[in-house]
Amino acid sequence: MSFIKDLQNKYKNLNVLEQLIVINVSLFILVLILKPFLGTVLSWLELKSDFNITILQPWTILTYAFLHYNPIHIIINMLWLYFIGKSFLNLFNPKTALNVYFLGAISGGIVFLLGYNLVPTFFKESAYVVGASAAVRALMIFLCAYMPKQEVPLFSFKLKLGHVGLALVAFDVMGLFGDNSGGNLAHLGGDALGYIYTTQLIKGNDIGKGFEKLMDTIVSWFKPSKKTPFKKVHKTKRKSKVAGVKKEDFDQFSKQKKIDLILDKIAKNGYDSLTAEEKEFLFRAGK
């Protein structure tokens, strides 16, 4: 029992994207072991290109993203998710990461279905799609579009994220003419979601808020209700702070003064002491 509790504690200490990696890998191992006995069950979780089947199995628009049958497929997806996750969570809060991930999976599934049903002459054979590629792609393109001028090292070269994003989309388009056309359709759905999410967020519109509220509501259904005797307690309301000052005061400052306050906080406590809101403001100011 102590071993199980130790694993549970380690899992809780992971960030949300690392937890998704654990879930995906665990399911892959489970499927690998039990696949001979789970044929019918697995078919209920795959996203089929036949729209009539999907109508009867609507959950597959999301469950397909948690199935991997090929070891190389899951290794590549999870490695990308691990390295992207660190950069993403340095800039944004965990809920934004989950919004992009799950909406990317859903968007990938929708584009997969549309491709096979609106252009049947191009995508002739019925197919199914599995894997987290569309969800991971959404996170990747989100970052590439959010900071396109950020340079990343590649061997002895440095590439701008904007160019990396364009190259990924180009590869996905070319992949439509290959053996994995269905998978590349899903990739393009994730690409589109990541780009749209970023461009709207820069404008101040978080398109994932509605999905976030829906997920919070669903999760609340499974949480045990805690009934405690009513006790009236008078508390002094704590006011949130940004860069060490009251948020309402911070909002009244000029842009330069806000930047100075955040830079002063970095000088005293380091970059990691910044909240996600402060990091996001500083990045936008830099643009």
Image: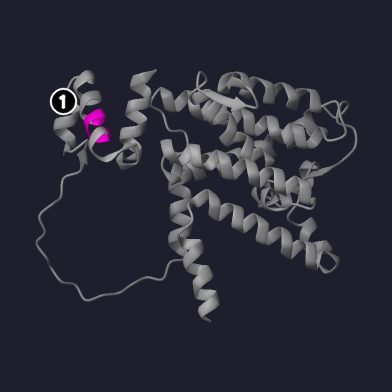
Relative depth, front residue between 120 and 173: 173
Q: Position of residue 211 (x, y in %)?
A: 49, 43
Q: Position of residue 74 (x, y in %)?
A: 72, 48
> What residue occupies the far front of the structure in this picture?
156
Q: Which residues are magenta?
A: 262-266
- Residue 269 is left or right of residue 87, and the answer is left
- Residue picked out by circle 1: 252
Q: Is residue 9 positioned above or below 90 on the image?
A: below
User: Is the stretch drawn in magenta largely helix, strand or loop?
Assistant: helix
Q: Residue at x 74, y 27 (%)?
A: 172
| Amino acid tagged 1 | Gln
Q: Is residue 224 positioned above or below 265 on the image?
A: below
Toward which corner of the image does residue 244 lie, by quadrant? top left
Task: For mark 1, give the secondary structure.
Answer: helix
Q: Position of residue 45 (x, y in %)?
A: 73, 55
Q: Residue at x 60, y 52 (%)?
A: 21
- Residue 64 is left or right of residue 149, and the answer is right
The C terminus is located in which quarter?
top left
Q: Position of residue 32 (x, y in %)?
A: 79, 62
Any part of residue 69 in sight: yes
- Residue 47 is left or right of residue 269, and the answer is right
Any part of residue 106 in sight: no
Toward which corner of the image does residue 23 lie, by quadrant? bottom right
